[in-house]
Image: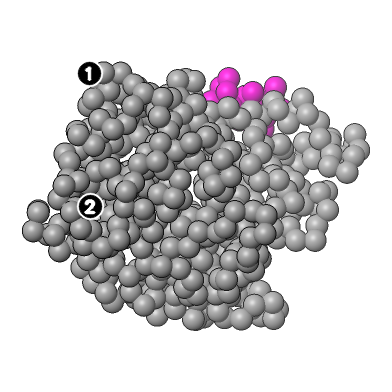
Amino acid sequence: MIELAAQRCQLPGWRDRLHSADEAAALIHDGMTVGMSGFTRAGEAKEVPLALARRAERDPLKITLMTGASLGHDIDGILADAGVLARRMPFQVDKRLRAAINRGEVMFVDTHLSEMAEQLRHDQLGALDIAVIEAVAITADGGIIPTTSVGNSASFVAQADQIIIELNVAAPEALIGLHDIYLPEKRPGRRPIPISAPDTRIGTPHIPVDPDKIAAIVLTTEQDSPAEITPANATTERIAEHLIEFFENEVAAGRMSLSLMPLQAGIGSVANAVLHGLMAGPFENLTMYSEVLQDSTFELLDHGTLRFASASAITLSDAYGARVWNNLAHYRERIVLRPQELSNHPGMSRRLGVIAINTAIEFDIYGNVNSTHINGTRMMNGIGGSGDFARNSHLSIFVTTSTAKTGALSSVVPFVSHVDHVEHDVDILVTEHGLADLRGLAPRERARVIIDRCADPFYRPALADYFETACARGGHTPHCLEQALAWHVAAERDGSMHAMVAGQT
């Protein structure tokens, strides 16, 4: 491992900074704020967090942990079980951490992914004590070349008092040169970020570092956790078909060309099904300006439908990962990884005209979307990047299946139990039953379209009855709040919304 590290690390005297994971973890003390690399289970620090959890079982301590997004290798769950996490932000997907959050044991700060680096830069979150960053290589002046994600790593390095580098000598060497690191200046007086197309490069291939801040280098060979890709099924394929048809109609109407606009797609089976479905359409020369490059991204690159993809991380299944990582040089000129405050920057989304496709837990008959909370109170994962894109995209699209829990719950409700994306930020809603184009529609018009085209037929009459009753009361956005909330009361009480169809409350 030392021989491989010598090929990857050009920093003079780097051997003097070599430490075990346990020694490096000892630099982290109770009450500290720690920033760790990692975005959607890609490129996270892998050894030091586990060493920290082992130490906490002997010598309890608590930290505030900031990352790019979710971590792989069950790290969030391990840290939660060890009692390490006092505060966590901005995103997570771990079941055990989620349970601790919902018990009130971990204070989770759900944050737009583009915003946390900005808040750090302007001292709104306090001092950052230590950054723990995974690297594929280290330059002669200490610059960190990230592995499979950039996330918030560049901002953590800039803000932290000390830096621990996990040098992953098993990460593909072809990652070197893949990154485009650029940090905006402080406000006010900031110059415009000079990205004018997804394939624009504006920064450096490494994260600049003050070498004096590098407190430890830890060697590792641990690979990223594979993405858990749920195969497309008949339901997700129907959602994809509705969207593909919509895009074809937009082209036919002259509002877009066959190249569409740059695509953004959230993680998950629906997003993968939609992107996969693009290969069957007439589309060509597509580009992507998104957060994550998934299996479907590389399928589109291989197919020739996608010309270029920009993101902040690469997250792949075992099957597709073997194909990509062994042939990464084949894709190098067609992909780039950026800091997440650039990949998710609202100004870039507005400038480039991004088509944003994200997933909802539920949406209501007026177009408000809940993407984070079960029954309005229990956190799932977090808002992630969906809000970054929704308000400023050329098209803001949210998709979901029309029901959940094998039909016990309707994903289309009179009023969402928690609002993450207000109706003003939502253009298109899609379920397996159809697509509701909400552009230019007033609330009463939206309700009819959403009920008729997106709701499951079992719940459609009850939703229509609710809307008629609400309209009789009047108002620009008609509601009977006691009836609207009764849908969620029934879900909490019975585990089902069937009572609303039966006219019971």
- Measured from the top left, where is residue 183 in percent x and y? 50, 59
Q: Is residue 26 above or below residue 249?
A: above
- Who's the residue at 18% across and 54% down the image? 13
Residue 401 in the magenta stretch? The answer is no
For this view, does 33 lie left or right of residue 374? left
Residue toward you, 127 or 432? 127
Residue 431, visible in the rendered structure? no
Q: Are marks 2 and 1 in contact (CB under 8 Å)?
A: no
For this view, does 444 lie left or right of residue 99? right
Q: Which mark is residue 167?
A: 2
User: Which residues, given as a range, are shown in magenta?
Assistant: 489-505
Residue toward you, 35 or 429? 35
Residue 284, visible in the rendered structure? yes
- Who's the residue at 58% across and 66% down the image? 193
Q: Is residue 201 above or below residue 222?
A: below
- Measured from the top left, where is residue 454 in percent x and y? 64, 51
Instruction: Say which element carries label 2.
Output: strand
Query: Are there few (<14), some (14-19), or many (20+) residues within 10 Å of tag 2?
Result: many
Q: Quadrant of the C terminus?
A: top right
Q: CA distance from mark 2 to mark 1?
A: 27 Å
Q: Residue under label 1, please give it.
A: 58
Q: Which mark is residue 414?
A: none
For the residue marked with disc 2, what is the amino acid? Leu
Q: Is residue 330 above or below residue 273?
A: below
- Who's the residue at 83% across and 53% down the image? 442
Residue 496 in the magenta stretch? The answer is yes
Instruction: Say which element carries label 1.
Output: helix
Q: Is residue 196 above or below residue 164?
A: below
For the residue marked with disc 1, what is the amino acid? Arg
Residue toward you, 333 or 234? 333
